[in-house]
Image (cartoon, grey):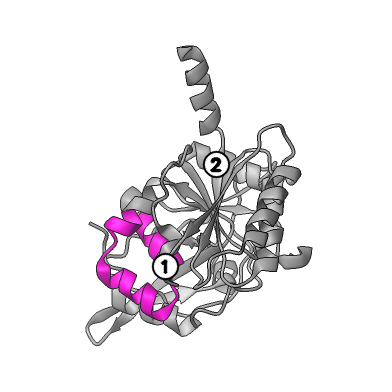
């Protein structure tokens, strides 16, 4: 009996939970749930729901049927809505009760990662489970002091491409350990959570700083093809999520919220079927970084 339980537990550790952030885009949500249900190592799919109205019975039924029918194996992923009373981007990183795996794949509802690429990224995360492993690299740098203070700048894709380095991967498509959900909710400085709530932006940068603070290590970028809604093939970072804030918000966030710069630069990427290589891809989005308060 104990051997069976141990085997069941070990099997769960070889799977991961997909955490989909959505906002008033049910058609995209349907595509995302159906797609990720077809990937072989999924244990559960959770949808972060922060809308005023509860998901309709029709939508819930459609998604549950999609999970059951699209699953490519006898193992059927668990499906659940994580309901929230308010529309707050901090909801994205609330702790989840009953998770059976350590690995979380956080993704926006309009980003589809091919299953083979996702499985490879999961294997990379398993080799470095304390790190963030993701598909959307960004960078930051420090300018000369202005008014006696360090000035942090945020660089989008073209900055990554031009400088050949990155210092964060965004949570719109990234693996991280489930413990960071608790740390974000209970240890993140209140000023950071207040900024995210007020400006409806920058929760992805805040999570990057939290993980860097906890690990003292850089993130890992996995280079791979991604699709947007309706299976449009896109380059690594084209497109955007629901318009909840401007690029200027991210500039302001970096200046106002960071006491200690914990992000470390890296020029290493992982590509399925190859060894690590220098960075050569990216996009523009946000101009400055934030000064994020050090996590206790």
The CA distance from mark 1 to mark 2 is 26 Å
Residue at the spot x=34%, y=76% of the render? 195
Res 86 quadrant in image: bottom left
Q: Which residues are magenta?
A: 183-211
Q: 161 above or below 177?
A: below
Locate residue 136 relative to residue 86 in the image: left or right.
right
Residue 134 % position (x, y) = 55, 54
Q: Which mark is residue 16?
A: 2
SS category of the residue bearing label 2: strand
Of labels 1 and 2, earlier in sequence is 2
Q: Which residue is mark 1?
A: 85
| Crowd tier of the residue under label 1, counting other residues whose Cα lies within 10 Å: few below 14, some 14–19, many 20 or above | few
Front residue of this view, candidates 278 and 23: 23
Q: Is residue 112 visible?
A: no
Which mark is nearer the camera, 1 or 2?
A: 1
Front residue of this view, candidates 60 and 143: 60
């Amino acid at each position: 009996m104990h051997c069976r339980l141990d085997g069941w537990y070990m099997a769960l550790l070889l799977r991961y939970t997909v955490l989909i952030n959505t906002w008033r885009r049910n058609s995209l949500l349907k595509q995302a749930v159906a797609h990720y249900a077809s990937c072989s190592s999924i244990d559960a799919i959770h949808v972060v729901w922060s809308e005023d109205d509860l998901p309709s019975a029709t939508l819930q039924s459609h998604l549950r049927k999609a999970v059951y029918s699209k699953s490519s194996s006898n193992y059927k992923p668990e499906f659940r809505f994580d309901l929230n009373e308010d529309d707050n981007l901090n909801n994205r990183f609330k702790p989840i009760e009953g998770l059976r795996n350590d690995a979380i794949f956080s993704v926006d509802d309009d980003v589809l990662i091919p299953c083979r690429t996702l499985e490879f990224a999961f294997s990379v995360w398993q080799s470095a489970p304390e790190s963030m492993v993701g598909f959307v690299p960004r960078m930051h740098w420090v300018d000369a002091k202005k008014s006696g203070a360090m000035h942090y700048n945020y660089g989008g894709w073209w900055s990554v491409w031009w400088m050949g380095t990155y210092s964060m991967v965004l949570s719109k498509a990234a693996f991280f350990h489930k413990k960071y959900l608790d740390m974000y909710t209970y240890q993140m400085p209140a000023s950071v959570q207040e900024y995210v709530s007020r400006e409806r932006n920058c929760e992805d940068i805040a999570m990057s700083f939290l993980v860097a603070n906890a690990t003292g290590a850089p993130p890992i970028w996995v280079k791979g093809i991604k699709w947007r809604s309706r299976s449009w093939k896109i380059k690594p970072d084209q497109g955007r999520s629901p318009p909840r804030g401007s690029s200027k918000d991210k500039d302001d966030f970096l200046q106002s919220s960071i006491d200690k710069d914990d992000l470390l630069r890296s020029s290493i990427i992982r590509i399925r079927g190859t060894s690590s290589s220098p960075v050569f891809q990216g996009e523009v989005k946000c101009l400055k970084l934030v000064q994020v308060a050090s996590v206790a």
